[in-house]
């Protein structure tokens, strides 16, 4: 009974956060839409995406399959691509199931956002700190 109560509270808090972040109508659309199951079999790709999702507190399915990208999600996608682009092309990543519903030119721009981060710009500093954290975590899994 106690676990059910805690899960209910967590569910309502998640729902409230989603409404605050996305608005009521967009949250409702997300709830009504069919969520695809994760089709990525390459464990390195999946590990990189999971690490980025954890850092940005974004749901894995939302990041991979959501058709609309706003705010922090574009940086999260950019970080995923930044780390994976060294070994895979955008076409290869899409064939493996990653961001297959997103346009390649848009994905390229998100990757370039990360490549062009500069400490001279105040808005880039938080993302450079995130990049430092992610560099360490991702280097560990690539060993």
Image (cartoon, helix red, strand yellow):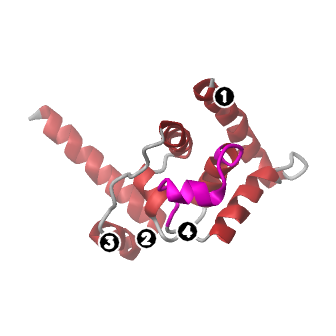
Q: Earlier in the sequence, mark 3 or mark 2?
A: 2
The residue carrying mark 3 is 28
Check if mark 2's residue and mark 1's residue have beta carbons within 8 Å: no
Q: Which mark is residue 139?
A: 1
- Find the distance from the CA under tag 4 to the CA under tag 3: 22 Å
Can residue 59 be seen here? The reply is no
Q: Give coordinates of residue 118: x percent, y percent.
A: 86, 49
Residue 13 shown left or right of residue 83 in the figure: left
Whichever of labels 2 and 1 marks the residue nearer the N terminus, that label is 2
Q: Is label 2 in a helix, a strand or a loop? A: loop
Which residue in the protein does label 2 denote?
Answer: 23
Direction bottom: furthest residue: 25
Q: Nearer the viewer, residue 91 or 98?
A: 91
> Residue 98: within the magenta?
yes
Of the image marks 1 and 4, the number of the one nearer the N terminus: 4
Q: CA distance from mark 2 to mark 1?
A: 36 Å
Name the residue rendered at 60%, 52% in the picture.
76
Q: Which residues are magenta?
A: 84-100
Element class at badge 1: helix
Residue 80 in the image: state x and y as whole percent: 61, 48
- Furthest-right residue in this view: 120
Position of the N terminus by quadrant:
top left
Q: Earlier in the sequence, mark 1 or mark 3?
A: 3
Q: Secondary structure at mark 3?
A: helix
Q: Nearer the viewer, mark 2 or mark 1?
A: 1
Q: Quadrant of the C terminus?
A: top right
Q: CA distance from mark 1 to mark 3?
A: 38 Å
Quick one: SS at disc 4?
A: loop
Disc 4 target residue: 102
């Amino acid at each position: 009974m106690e676990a059910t109560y805690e899960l209910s509270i967590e569910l309502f808090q998640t729902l409230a956060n989603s409404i605050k972040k996305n608005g009521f109508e967009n949250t409702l659309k997300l709830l009504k839409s069919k969520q695809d199951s994760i089709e990525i079999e390459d464990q390195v790709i999946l590990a990189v995406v999971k690490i980025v999702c954890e850092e940005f507190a974004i749901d894995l399915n939302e990041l991979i399959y959501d058709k609309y990208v706003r705010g922090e999600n574009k940086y999260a996608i950019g970080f995923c691509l930044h780390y994976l682009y060294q070994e895979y092309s955008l076409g290869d990543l899409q064939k493996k199931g990653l961001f297959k519903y997103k346009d390649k030119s848009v994905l390229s721009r998100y990757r370039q956002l990360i490549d062009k981060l500069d400490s001279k710009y105040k808005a880039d500093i938080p993302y450079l700190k995130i990049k430092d954290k992610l560099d360490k975590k991702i280097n560990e899994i690539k060993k």
